[in-house]
Amino acid sequence: MLPKQYRLKKRSAFKATYKVKNSSHSGGVTLFAGIKKKDDSPTKVGFVVSKKVHKRAVKRNRLKRLMRESYRLYLKEGNLGQSQNYLSLVFVGTEKALGKSYEQINKSVQKVLEQI
């Protein structure tokens, strides 16, 4: 699980991140990046899978867990590249990502982090 200092929690913060319209997409995972930061505060991260993607909460939560774990390991390694220059990041899972394994989700998360 991500430490509290890295979690994006407020609805207004999610909306502000979407409003910037800076995004990239790969393999069923979309990454929205907020505005660039000027100070040394940590980048806040949120994970979203809409109810429209699948009606079962178990499926949605599994996809969120896979994306969260992948990001956590990249954070631990320090392998995030330019994504640390943003105030907030929001990972959005789509229908394409539902049946995928951890390795496939990990590759998608890595690719969107490189693209941003």
Image: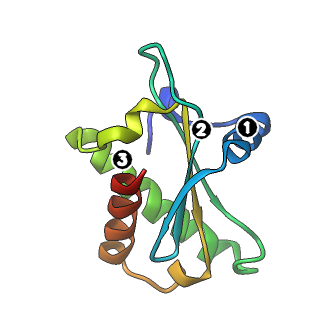
Amino acid under disc 1: Ala
Within 10 Å of disc 2 (Cα), the crowding (few <14, some 14-19, many 20+) is many
Q: Amino acid at mark 3?
A: Arg
- Give the residue at mark 3: 72
Disc number placed over residue 16 in the picture, else none: 1
Q: CA distance from mark 3 to mark 2?
A: 19 Å
Give the residue drawn at x 33%, y 60%: 110
Q: Is residue 114 above or below residue 43?
A: below
Mark toward the start of the polypeptide (3 vs 2): 2
Q: CA separation, marks 1 and 3? A: 23 Å
Q: Is residue 26 above or below residue 23?
A: below
Q: Would you call the spot at circle 3 few (<14 residues within 10 Å), some (14-19), or many (20 or more)? A: some
- Dot 3: what SS? helix
Mark 2 residue type: Gly
* Residue 34, numbered circle: 2
x 39%, y 34%: residue? 84
Q: Earlier in the sequence, mark 1 or mark 3?
A: 1
Mark 2 touches mark 1? (CB < 8 Å): yes
Identify the secondary structure beneath mark 2. loop
Q: Secondary structure at mark 1?
A: helix
**Quarter in which the N terminus is drawn:** top left
On screen, residue 85 versus residue 10, left or right, reads left
Nearer to us: label 1 or label 3: 1
**Near-viewer residue (5 or 28):** 28
Could you say where residue 17 lies in the image, as x and y percent from the top left? 66, 41
The disc label shown at residue 45, or none: none
Does the residue at mark 1 contact the one at mark 3 (Cβ under 8 Å)? no
Q: Residue visible at 34% across and 77% down?
A: 104
Image location of residue 106, percent across then percent down: 33, 66
Expressed as whole percent of the image width and height from the top left, the position of residue 64 reads 54, 62
